Image: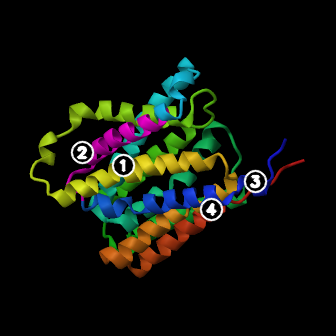
Amino acid sequence: MIATENTLNNRPSVIKMSIAMILFGSVGFFSERSGVPALELVFIRCVCASVFLGFFWWASGRLRSENWNRNEVFRILICGIFLILNWIYFFKAIEESGVTVAISIYHLAPVIVMIFRAFIYKEKLTLIPMIAILAFFSGTLAIAEINRTSSVSEFFSQGLIFGLLSALFYALLTLTGKGFKYASSYAITTIQVAFGALLLIPFVNFSAFDNLTGMNWLYILITGFVHTGIVFYLFFDSIRHLSTQLIAILVFLDPLVAILMDIFITGFAPSIEQWIGIILIFGGMALTLMPKKKHI
């Protein structure tokens, strides 16, 4: 029996996906108030998510019935490396340049995926993808306020570089994480965050957790359990019931919420150039969602 579009796009799943994206959009606001550096925050995030998602993996009964494939497990572990690098550089971008700039640069990932696919899989770049790439490139220059920089080194600030690295590793995660056939979504996410936590242990500066206030710990735990554990649970519990096009549209809630919170709560005031950059990047994201023409 073929599921209809109405069956796929059911209201409870839309609500869950929307909540997941809204929550994830607020992660920058909470990370800025955690009081710990990016790497240590990612470590706690991985630990909290491992506990939360591991419990649901066990409670769902999938843990005992997983069908393991060696090559797929290896790919899951590689995805775990890309995931933690993506998070670390994203939070470092927030530390250096603020939420709005970091989240805008972070969403260059779709165009990086398009470029990789063109080189690796020899996919032809048609007019729409080329316009999207141009919009992303122009938007990046505008957000970085290239007209106000006097040298190349000044333009390539740490915030911009960290943002570009976060987008790069998000793109690699997207490409590597496609097409898992055996492991459940619970297994994939739990293994990735647990492996990430193990990898980070030798690099964590545990003294960074000294002298934190109760509010710092509250923001840290919310980032771990809510923005990772609950968000991942809602995301994977809803994604199987939604069409690809609707998922792509709902993903827009993430940067939208992040930017609105940064402006109205944190008090960030984008310059005219940065507003133009934000609009160009959102426009580029919209272009990447356009369906490809099928050649007969």
Model colouring: rainbow
Residue drawn at point x = 29 percent, y = 56 percent: 158
Q: Residues within 10 Å of mark 1 (few under 14, many from 20)?
A: many
Q: What type of secondary structure mainly makes up the magenta span? A: helix
Front of the two marks 4 and 1: 1
Q: Is residue 4 shown in magenta?
A: no
Disc 2 to disc 4: CB gap under 8 Å: no
Under tag 4, what secondary structure? Answer: helix
Q: Residue furthest top?
A: 70
Amino acid type at circle 3 is: Thr
Q: Residues within 10 Å of mark 2 (few under 14, many from 20)?
A: many
Magenta residues span: 34-57
Is residue 240 shown left or right of residue 219? right
Under tag 1, what secondary structure? Answer: helix
Amino acid type at circle 4 is: Ile
Which residue does the numbered mark 4 point to in the structure image?
A: 249
Cα distance between the residues tagged 2 and 3: 42 Å
Taking 117 as reference, is 260 above or below it?
below
Taking 144 as reference, is 166 above or below it?
above
Cα distance between the residues tagged 2 and 1: 15 Å
Which residue does the numbered mark 3 point to in the structure image?
A: 7
Disc 4 to disc 3: CB gap under 8 Å: no
Amino acid type at circle 2 is: Glu
Front of the two marks 2 and 1: 1
Give residue 40's mark.
2
Q: Which comes sooner in the sequence, label 2 or label 4? A: 2
Front of the two marks 2 and 3: 3
| Residue 137 in view of the camera | no
